[in-house]
Amino acid sequence: MRSAVAPMFRAFRHPNYRRWAVADFVSVTGAWMQNLALNWFVLVKTGSPGLLGLSLLFQLLPGVLLGSVAGSVADKWPTKRVLLITQSLHGLLALVLVGLAWVDGPLAAVYALALLGGVVTVFDGPALGRFGSQLVPREDLSNALGLGSILSSGGRILGMGLAGAMVAVTGIPLLFAINAVSFGAVLVAIAKVRPEGMFHLATSTAERTGVKAGIRYVLGHRPLVLMFLLGFVLSCLGRNYQVTMAAMSSGPLAAGPEGYGVLSVIFSVGTVLGGFLAAACKNLTLRLVLWTALGTSVLQFFSGATPTLWSFAALLVPIAIGAVVLDTATSTRIQLDTDEDMRGRVLAAKGIVTAASGAIGGPLLGWLSEFAGPGPALEIAGAVTVVATAVAWLLFARSPQRRAMPA
């Protein structure tokens, strides 16, 4: 039994990763408590889902505009120093939210804090990715990313569950305060990371530093560009299930808010299972990315025609599993198939793609659900992602940069 279990958790053999994993779980839990509290605060204050969506846009916009600069900073500055700054700023912004919620401050201040939080997050993301890949050796990176997916999904379930139970009893300010305290755990973990236990990455030479060098590198790496284009389409039309689950629950499934809650829990459970599957895979290859993208797209197409809540939920589980495997495999390939000194800028480019796809995909799927119906919206989106995956597969096969493809 030991031999079967140990490989799935092999990243935990490294003390620095163990320290970081515990702190990351605490921080993710606090972050999801704040997300729920912030969304509820804006919704109660305005009564408008549209104004709530605007706050989400403010959080995503800096990722599109500043991602390339953030990647350059992550590759140039020591990641530990960058993270100490960004995580401290996250905690400080959470404390400001405590005061804002306590005095029922103006909506403009909420939007300003959402924008500032988005700016901090865009610099935080590439540094976190580069820092995380230094906590384990190259051969354990895919396992560390898979375990990270499990921790993120678990923290999301726990954070939203605690927030849902506490918000009516304790009020919103306490949830913001808990998130502020959670960043203390991250700062302690970063401070306790032992330099001798880190696996240092190569740094850029003078001619390979800066934003322009990163853009030239990404655009000159055809498999990487194809991966980002495929990821953009999949994220736009195949990953915004918060929109389509709500539309299906209130529409053809006639399940109401209770059904939406059930589907959200089931989807979260699927993401945990997907994290275990990704962690168990020894090699997360490009071929696995393409097969998973194709499988989840086909399942999404058929989910649009399901007549009941439980038949929809039955398809939702493998879709959630596939989504996490796809994310983990994509992140692994992006990091392992590119030069170490470009790691931060490549991860920043991925962050730009993710932010742009979220900003476009959510409203697009909402519009399709409103005018074509939730079921047809899922079918249209599924058909488009199937075609996109097939085209990407053909272009990958014809790419001259064969070293980025699986054996």
Image: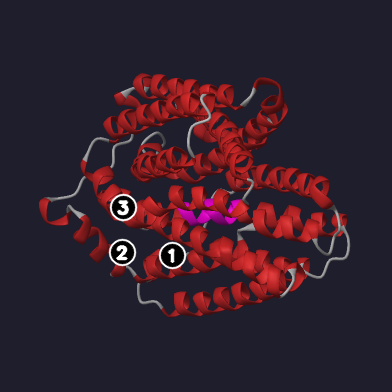
**Along the viewing direction, whichever of 238 and 3 lies nearer the viewer:** 238
**Residue 366, located in which quarter of the rendered image?**
bottom right
Mark 2, residue position: 218
Q: Do the residues labelled 3 and 1 touch (CB within 8 Å)?
A: no
Q: Disc number at residue 228?
A: 1
Q: In percent of the image, x 41 and y 36: which residue is there?
A: 136
| Residue 52, above or below 124 | below
Image coordinates for residue 173, horizontal then vertical, percent: 56, 24
Q: Disc number at residue 293?
A: none
Q: What residue type is labelled 2?
A: Val
Select label 3 or label 1 by which is in front.
Answer: 3
Residue 297 appears left or right of 335: right
Residue 120 appears left or right of 76: right
Compute the Cα span from label 2 to label 1: 10 Å
Comes first in the chain, label 2 or label 3: 3
Select label 2 or label 3 by which is in front.
Answer: 3
Mark 3, residue position: 66
Element at label 1: helix
Residue 34 appears left or right of 157: left
Quick one: label 3, few (<14), some, or many (20+) residues within 10 Å? some
